[in-house]
Amino acid sequence: MITEAKAQEYRDKGYIVVPSLLTPAEVAEIVAAADSVMGRAKELDRSDEILDLDDAHTRHAPLVRRIKNPNQHHEVFARLAKQPRILDVLEKVLGPDIRFHHSKLNNKSAGGGAAVEWHQDWAFYPHTNDDVLAVGIYLDDCGLDNGPLLCVPGSHKGPTFDHHVDGAFCGAMDPTVAKLDYGKAEALYGPAGSITVHHARMVHGSALNRSNRTRRLYLMGYTAADAWPLLGVPDFAAYEAMMVRGRSTLAPRIKEAPIRVPFPVAKNQGSIYENQKELKHRFFDEDGPDGRRAAE
């Protein structure tokens, strides 16, 4: 559980960090599960429906950028969706009725793990109201040097920025068009077992991992039960099974929020890393000393 002051910090800034919420033993169990799933990379030449592979990946030198929907591929991740201490935190900001939305594990390998350009999760999956957020669990100690999550404070109260290029969704904002003070972005870091919580409309991203330490972040999306996806519910039984606390409802709560739909779909499918390849003006520059553009 978090204090009311911490909950208000989330409302004001759009994100919080709760240090060391999970124990070292719990983190070790998650890491073992991640290693088990990622071990398949040695048998793959290209990304599949479970693993998103780095462009430099080979079977002899596997490089995994992401596990897609880990909760569907290992029971440890499935259990984490209902982790009581995490749900206690979420209840303070979402209310008592909470629905799980999705999961992914982003793996930033040591010495150059891929950057994620500025974006808003809201652009991918708008709902009838914006009580929608993501929880991140750091599986490694995360500092300023190994690609922490970066958030622009208060941006969850602003517009939904355009995430398109040449008429198609690309899962990223053009930093030359979306005028924000990116210099105000704050790094969300902490020891392994810490969790981050960020609002779906929060502008966020992460630089390359320039350190010699891996940075793994397991992300789980959640919504208030009365926030219904505007892109539809293709399988109602599966949707109802995603309730993790409280009760569901057939009465969506409608709250005005700026929305852009992610259509036409991205030219490159598979993951946000593939979506963002179409972005013409990148913010996080591989040639920069800290993974950011020198002109930032």
Image (cartoon, grey):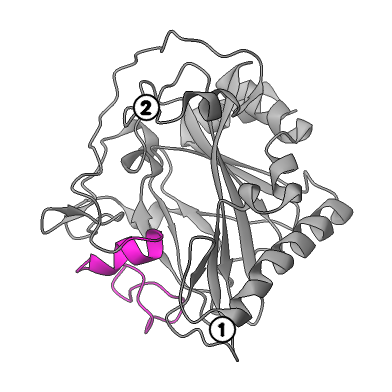
The residue under label 2 is which amino acid type?
His
Image quadrant holding the N terminus, namely top right
Question: Which quarter of the figure has residue 155?
Answer: top left
Q: Position of residue 260 (x, y in %)?
A: 22, 37
- Is residue 21 shown to the viewer in this render? yes
The structure residue drawn at horizontal position 64% and vertical position 22%, both measured from the top left corner, is 92
Q: Position of residue 282 (x, y in %)?
A: 27, 69
Question: Which quarter of the figure has residue 227?
Answer: top left
- Is residue 214 shown to the viewer in this render? no
| Residue furthest to the bottom | 60
Please check the rendered image and state whether residue 271 is part of the magenta-colored stretch, yes or no.
yes
- For the residues labelled 2 and 1, the Cα–Cα distance comes to 37 Å
Please indicate whether residue 216 sits to the left or right of residue 277 in the image. right
Seen from the viewer's position, the closer of residues 74 and 29 is 74
Seen from the viewer's position, the closer of residues 139 and 31 is 31
Q: Which marked residue is nearer to the observer: mark 2 or mark 1?
A: 2
Please indicate whether residue 55 sits to the left or right of residue 107 in the image. left
Seen from the viewer's position, the closer of residues 261 and 68 is 68
Q: Position of residue 48 (x, y in %)?
A: 48, 67
Q: Earlier in the sequence, mark 2 or mark 1?
A: 1
The structure residue drawn at horizontal position 33% and vertical position 73%, both measured from the top left corner, is 293
Seen from the viewer's position, the closer of residues 280 and 246 is 246
Numbered label attached to residue 111: 1
Q: Secondary structure at mark 2?
A: loop
The magenta span reads 269-296
Residue highlighted by disc 2:
127
